[in-house]
Image (cartoon, rainbow, N blue to C red):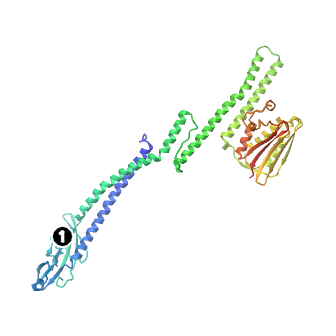
Amino acid sequence: MKKLSIRLKITLWFSVILILVVALTYLVILSVSGQIIQKTIRDNLIQTVESNVDEAEYYSSADMATMRNDVDYYVRYGDGYIEIDDDFLNQVNGVYTSLCSVDGDLIYGENPIIRETADLDFLDSQVQRITVDGTLYYVFDRKPETEGLEEMWLRGVVSENQGDAEMSDISRYSLILLPSLVLIAIIGGYLIACRMLRPIRQIADTAEQISQGDDLKKRIVLNEGDDELHQLAGQFNDMFARLDTSFQTQQQFVSDASHELRTPVAVINAQCELTLEQERTPEEYEEAMRVVWRQGRKMNRLINSMLDFTRLKLQPEKYTKEKMNLSELTDSVCQDMALIREKEITLTCEVEPDVYCLGNRELLTRLLNNLISNAYRYGKENGQIRVTLATDKDGKITLSVQDDGIGIAAEDLPHIFDRFYQADGSRSSGGSGLGLAMAQEIAAFHEGEISVDSVLGVGSTFCIHLKIC
């Protein structure tokens, strides 16, 4: 059972349940049909007797009896005659009708159990039951209201076996039709199961192709629909997309790491080889160690930045958002960064009070730190950095960092948010090349955007646009 396919398991369970239901239905049909047939037999008995109760007349003399020209039957009774209409039959549809005296003697007609019913009381318009040799008979009596027949009874008798033929037909047809319907339903159920489970087969095939070929670009393509299987296929496609993104990011991380770490590793190796070629003075050894230390710090900053960037890109759910006072955060960061005083640059801050947004405090702090650090790094001696925070009438927040530094060339502006992009030698002063890329990812995480306006030799202005909360 465990090795069977899902569609076969579904079909088997469906078949077992269907067979049980059909078997129960067959028993119900036989039971109900038997009851209906027995009722029909009793109703037919009553109807037959009731229709014959007026078929007998009494004549006190033979002359009165012969005056009629009908082809009837005449039976001598007492001092007169009983005329029996020719429509009065001994047996109709298994119902036997007989004309009896009050003592139970048969006067006319037929009764197959006359001896057994001889002692059975006459009860007007009531159905009685009597069992003879294991067979149940229904007996129905009627008292004729015709003058001269006051001492007689009309008795009808029918056997319950009268319905055997009908029951046999019902049973035979049921045994033919019900199994046929079961067979058709099982075949139909199997085909429906195959059709309904086809998306699962497509999901399995696509997953197998991805597993064997490492092609995460493949997707499950189904017809239009919104049932559970289509939802499952959509979730698998989303999963494949995330795996593809993770795989691409991993490949990019490895590529970036190998590329960016090559230079500091080469510098360290070269410095070590040069230092070990011959005996050096303590000062030369100290200088060599300083070179190794600087390159090690550069590698450490680069690796941390790459890990942070990758973590934000692949696992944004680890950074929770909350309603926060962006004004207080901006003011706090500016106060801390103003202490740097690198190149005697002055940092000023203009913050609109009580500006709230839905964000992550750690990430927004890093965003602002990155932009201000860049402004210091590429600023000029005794320059200015101006940080502003304001809202507009459309409910948008604008956070800007403006400097009067070296600026960015127009041809470099489209690429400054690319990872590890360095515009020129003048802008490669110790940065990892990930600061602006990280800033863009943080803005996107907050459903915002970042833009830049810069003129070479004049300065740059970075603006972050967020939604107000």
Q: Is residue 66 above or below residue 213?
A: below
* Amino acid beneath label 1: Gln
What is the quadrant of residue 2 in the picture?
Answer: top left
Label 1 packing within 10 angstroms: few (<14), some (14-19), many (20+): some
What is the quadrant of residue 29 in the picture?
Answer: bottom left
The one nearer the camera, 445 or 131, is 445
Q: Which residue is mark 1?
A: 91
Q: Position of residue 260 (x, y in %)?
A: 72, 29
Would residue 294 be found to the left or right of residue 159 on screen? right
How many labels sit on residues?
A: 1
Q: Position of residue 135 (x, y in %)?
A: 21, 64
Q: Position of residue 334 (x, y in %)?
A: 83, 43
The one nearer the camera, 315 or 234, is 234
Would residue 3 be found to the left or right of residue 99 on screen? right
Q: Residue furthest top?
A: 278
What is the quadrant of residue 141 in the picture?
Answer: bottom left
Q: Secondary structure at mark 1?
A: strand
Residue at coordinates 35% horizontally, 50% vertically from top-left? 183
Q: Is residue 72 above or below residue 246?
A: below
Q: Position of residue 407 (x, y in %)?
A: 82, 37
Residue at coordinates 41% horizontally, 47% vertically from top-left? 190
